[in-house]
Each structure stands twice: as C-alpha cells, then as structure tokens.
Image: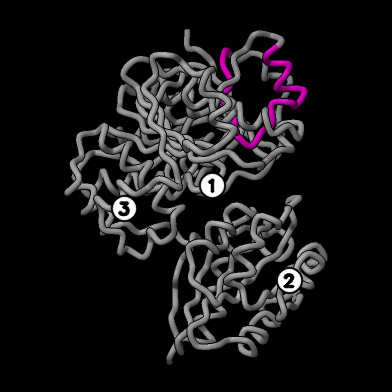
C-alpha cells in the first residue's frame, strides 16, 4: 500500500516536493488556498498529480501519513497544530528532499547576504568544473532538482522558515552569516526565537562536518556552547579579513565592500572542503556575477554612477551598501517601514550622503529622523517625482543609490519590481542614446 503524502502550497517548494514524492512511490495530493501559477499547474498536470487550488479540503487532510508544508505557512495555524496533535509529521521540503540524496550539501543562512554567498559557493564550484546545483531559497527547489536532475553538490540557501521544518537534515557544511531582527512576527516578536531558528541549520551536524560562522555576531556566539561538540567550527570575522584580502585579487566590482568580502571569505572556506585550491578560487572570484538588485551598478553617465540595491530591505543591508560605496551619495530610501532604527547609519550618512530622496506613500519616519541631518531632503510618492529631484541634485562624481531600508509593498509588487522599474526609468532618462 502506498504511503499518502499531502503537500500544502503550490509554489516552487511545494511542486518540487510533490514531484519528488511521486517519484519515490507516494500517493500525492497538493492543496493551495490561493491560485496556483500556470507554470506550476502544468508541471503537476504533466506528472499526473492531483491538486486543488483556492481552498483547503480539511476533511480529508488527516488521512495522510506525512505533510510537506510550504515555508510561507506559519506553524501556529490551527490545522497545522492539529496534524501534530494526531502525530502526523509536518516537515519542510528541505527535510523531505534530504532523505533522497547522498550528495554533498553546503547550506547557507543569515539575515543578510545569504543569496550572494550561495551564489558565490555555486559559481566558485562551477568555475572549477564541479557538478553543483543552486537550490533552495534561490534557484530551483531542492526537491525538484533531486527528483529530476540530481547533482553531486548542492549550494543550498535556507530561510529561517525552511529551517523550522527540518528534523534530521544534516548538511556537510553549514554557514550562518549574521543574525539581525527580521520576520519577528513569525517568532512572537522574540529575537531569540528567530536566532534559535537560524542555528537549527547545524543542529544535526557531527564529526567531519563543518560550521562556518560570523565570529563577531553576538547572537551566534551566545549559542556556540549549544552546538554538537564534535562539530568543526570555522570563525570568519568581518573586521579580520586580511588573510583573504592578501591572498586574492578583489578587483571584481561585484565584490566591493567589506560585507561582500566577508561573504566571499565564508564561501571560500566552504569550497575548500570540496578540494578547491586558491588558483581555482581566484578564477571563480574573477568571473563572479551577483544577482540583480544587490549593489548592482548598472549605468555610468555624465560622471554619475547609478546603483540598484533594492534588495536592501532592512537597515543592516543599507549599512553595508553605504559602507561599500564612496561618496558623495544621493540616497533613495523608503517604502513600508519595518520598525527601523536608523542610528547605526549616522556615521556613514554624515560622511557620505549628500542628499536623500524618500520614496514611498508614508515617509514620515525617514523625514523626521533626517530632517536636521541631511541638508537636501525631500519626500516623493512616485518615480516621476524622484526622477525630477535626481535631475535637480545630480553632480559629477556622485553615486545615485537606491537602497530602501524598507519593504516595497506600498508602491511596488516586491523588491524585484521596485528595482526593475528604477533601472528602467534611469536608463530611459540618462543612458546615452
């Protein structure tokens, strides 16, 4: 008799889990309370997997022997708790996928920088001709890649939500880059609970495994004594990067700033466990291209550089951006405030920021904080008004930086939409015809 598996959520993660489950002999059903994207419905139809959208048929849910839950569904929901009361395992797609691969796994998490670091691991290994796949919170779902095109090595980005659903997942290498307040609504507004979630990445690691971590992050350091004693630990500190700076050439513009050198140092330590030597690593660093919207320098015109850092949705990410860029900076920030405190930016703003354009529907917090700190300061609620102020204030040698410190949902669909339309309007108006 086939075991029955229920997948909750019809996105990249859920569809990947459903396809892997079918391959492994499960009787699979997928349920999504919203609309499933056409590309995912096609994959389910092609595989012959039954599914529903726009509802959850709760009356049949407890007939299943295991549940794979989308990371976007909170554990606190009543029907999720009901599964646990009936001893029906509720796991993440990451936990499910790891049961069906013996590949080498390098897993990366952190509040900031995890996508860049995961991309670095992937691109360094790929440049050395290793059989590596980019999966998880970036790229393809872990489960789908395991099902359809297995790799020898996985560079796996993990969010705290994905880590909440693991039980036996054990990466060969784990990386925790940093822990700063984020997504606290999922953790009862308790920073320690969020930090504990991040450290789950290495809870099952053992002898022969490696844990790479930020040696100056207080929340990580507080938890080192709780980790498995046999685990090999590697501390990398952002203020002690001399050995890496002296060993490698950092002229690739995608690696500007201490934060990106720190990310690269963590990636270097990870890929060394796969046998890469420094010459191979240097080749990968030279070729590295980061994802869009992360300190993306996309145009230089009339002596002005335009930089899209739309992914910087919290204050710490903006700190890294301001630290990496030489002034003077025309800074564009704003959106939906996430409870931001801007004091940590004071020194960099004073040293580098010549002007601030607050872009959003409610810029009161930014305006109040910077009213007496930045001479050129304005609030706008559209890209057209933003463009007018850029034209008024631009000067040769200036960097125009979109680094919002806020989420994008007041004027845009997401940070990618915000970055794309910012680039589009700048290219239309400043690029040499």
Asked whether the viewer can see residue 421, the reply is: no
Residue at 26 percent of width and 32 percent of height: 273
Question: What residue is shown with label 1?
Answer: 112
Q: In the rendered structure, which segment of residues is drawn in magenta?
A: 65-84
Above or below residue 2? Residue 190 is: below
CA gap, disc 2 and disc 3: 34 Å
Count of numbered circles on the image: 3
Above or below residue 208? Residue 258 is: below
Q: Earlier in the sequence, mark 2 or mark 3?
A: 3
Image x and y of residue 313, in percent: 62, 55
CA gap, disc 3 and disc 1: 21 Å
Category of crowding for the residue at label 3, using alpha-carbon neighbours closer than 10 angstroms: few (below 14), some (14–19), many (at least 20): some
Q: Earlier in the sequence, mark 3 or mark 1?
A: 1
Residue at 53 percent of width and 22 percent of height: 166
Above or below residue 333? Residue 336 is: above
**Magenta stretch: residue 192 in it?**
no
Give the left or right position of residue 258, taking residue 278 as reference: right
As drawn, the label of residue 346 is none
Query: Element type at marker 2?
Result: loop
Above or below residue 255? Residue 423 is: below
Q: Nearer the viewer, residue 405 or 433?
A: 405
Question: What residue is shown with label 3?
Answer: 245
Q: Residue furthest bottom?
A: 433
As drawn, the label of residue 373 is 2
Q: Quadrant of residue 309?
A: bottom right
Image x and y of residue 42, in percent: 48, 44
Question: Closer to the camera: disc 1 or disc 2?
Answer: 2
Image x and y of residue 369, in percent: 78, 64
């Amino acid at each position: 008799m086939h075991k029955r598996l229920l997948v909750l959520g019809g996105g990249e993660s859920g569809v990947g889990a459903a396809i892997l489950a079918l391959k492994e002999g499960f009787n699979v059903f997928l349920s999504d309370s919203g609309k499933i994207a056409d590309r995912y419905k096609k994959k389910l139809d092609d595989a012959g997997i039954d599914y529903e959208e726009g509802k959850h048929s709760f009356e049949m849910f407890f007939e299943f022997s295991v549940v794979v839950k989308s990371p976007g569904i909170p554990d606190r929901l009543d029907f999720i708790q009901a599964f646990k009361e009936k001893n029906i395992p509720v796991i993440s797609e990451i936990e499910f996928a790891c049961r069906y691969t013996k590949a080498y796994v390098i897993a990366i998490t952190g509040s900031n920088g995890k996508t860049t670091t995961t991309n670095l691991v992937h691109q360094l290994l790929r440049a050395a001709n290793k059989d590596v796949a980019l999966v998880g919170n970036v790229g393809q779902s872990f489960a789908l890649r395991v099902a359809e095109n297995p790799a020898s090595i996985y560079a796996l980005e993990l969010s705290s939500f994905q880590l909440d659903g693991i039980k036996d997942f054990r990466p060969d290498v784990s990386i925790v880059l940093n822990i700063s307040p984020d997504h606290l609504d999922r953790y009862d507004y308790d920073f320690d609970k969020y930090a504990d979630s991040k450290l789950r990445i290495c809870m099952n690691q053992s002898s022969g495994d490696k844990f790479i971590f930020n040696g100056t992050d207080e929340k990580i350091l507080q938890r080192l004594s709780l980790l498995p004693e046999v685990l090999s630990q590697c501390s990398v500190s952002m203020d002690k990067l001399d050995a890496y700076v002296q060993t490698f050439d950092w002229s690739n513009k995608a690696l500007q700033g201490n934060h990106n050198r720190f990310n690269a140092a963590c990636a270097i330590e990870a890929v060394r466990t796969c046998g890469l030597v420094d010459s191979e690593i240097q080749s990968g660093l030279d070729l590295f291209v980061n994802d869009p919207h992360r300190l993306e320098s996309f145009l230089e015109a009339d002596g002005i550089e335009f930089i899209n850092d739309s992914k910087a949705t919290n204050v710490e990410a903006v700190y890294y951006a301001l630290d990496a860029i030489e002034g003077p900076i025309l800074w564009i920030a704003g959106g939906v405030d996430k409870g931001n405190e801007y004091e940590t930016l004071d020194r960099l703003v004073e040293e580098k920021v010549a002007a601030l354009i607050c872009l959003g529907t409610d810029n009161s917090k930014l305006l109040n904080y910077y009213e007496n700190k930045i001479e050129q300061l304005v609030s706008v609620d559209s890209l057209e008004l933003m463009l007018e102020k850029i034209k008024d204030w631009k000067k040769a040698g200036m960097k125009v930086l979109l680094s919002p410190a806020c989420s994008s949902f007041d004027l845009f669909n997401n940070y990618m939409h915000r970055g794309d339309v910012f680039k589009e309007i700048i290219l239309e108006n400043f690029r040499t015809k």
